[in-house]
Amino acid sequence: MNGHTPGEPVDMNAVAVVCRRAWNAVEPRDRTEMKSPAQTVIIHHTALRYCDSVSQLAHIQHMHMQERGFDDIGYNFLISGDGMVYEGRGWGIVGAHAKEHNLNSVGIAFMGNFNDEMPSSAAQSALLRLLHIGVLHGHVWPNFVLEGHRDVAKTECPGEYLYALLPKLRDQLQNQ
């Protein structure tokens, strides 16, 4: 699913999610289920160059598992510049994206480096639809808190431009 044209109605009940099998994810070493819906959604960027292909997902998963010792890719979902949403750990699984905040949060990474550029409108729209679905299906509390990774850790993540966009995204979420 590609993004939508600004001003067009968005079908908030539709979001295309590319499953792990479709991007050839390696099986996780371990999975821990969340005990309740996420109270917080933490936004990240991959800090890699702009990408909208599945090859970057395998690279990220390999880096997380081999170099960082994670049981799987750290994020619950990843969003590419063309608005595609990729399943990382998925809904209801504890991520490894924000130390000391993983048990009650969902981590969503925008694919790219947003210190120098804005995320695409397609990616922004995909995030809004994904979060709407998460709430609708009980994976995320309706009154969840949307934060950037830098709100919970000493990091530049999710990049200057994406972080500056979070208040606008919060407003859009409240008006859905």
Image (cartoon, rainbow, N blue to C red):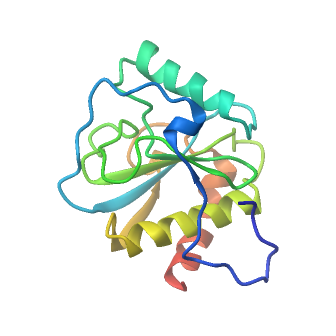
The quadrant holding residue 83 is bottom right
Residue, far top: 66
Q: Is residue 14 toward the left or the right of residue 52 in the image? A: left
Q: Quadrant of the C terminus?
A: bottom right
Relative to 73, does residue 75 appear above or below in the rendering? below
Q: Is residue 80 left or right of residue 147?
A: right
User: Is residue 75 positioned above or below 57 on the image?
Assistant: below
Give the tally of numbered discs.
0
Q: Quadrant of the N terminus?
A: bottom right
Q: Position of residue 42 (x, y in %)?
A: 44, 52
Extreme-front residue of the structure: 21
Image point (59%, 22%), residue name: 59
Quadrant in the rendering for residue 52? top right
Q: Give me the residue at 69% from left, 39% from top.
A: 112
Q: Nearer the viewer, residue 44 or 3?
A: 3
Residue 54 image point, x, y percent: 66, 34
Which residue is at a point 57% across and 68% down the rendered structure image? 128
Residue drawn at x 67%, y 52% as measured from the top left: 84
Q: Front-most of 107 and 155?
A: 107
70 with respect to 171 (left or right): left
Image height check: is 147 above or below 62?
Answer: below
Q: Position of residue 15 (x, y in %)?
A: 59, 64
Note whether 131 is above or below 11 in the view shown.
above
Residue 127 screen position, x and y as percent: 58, 61
The residue most toward the right is: 5
Could you say which quadrant of the image residue 74 lies in? top left
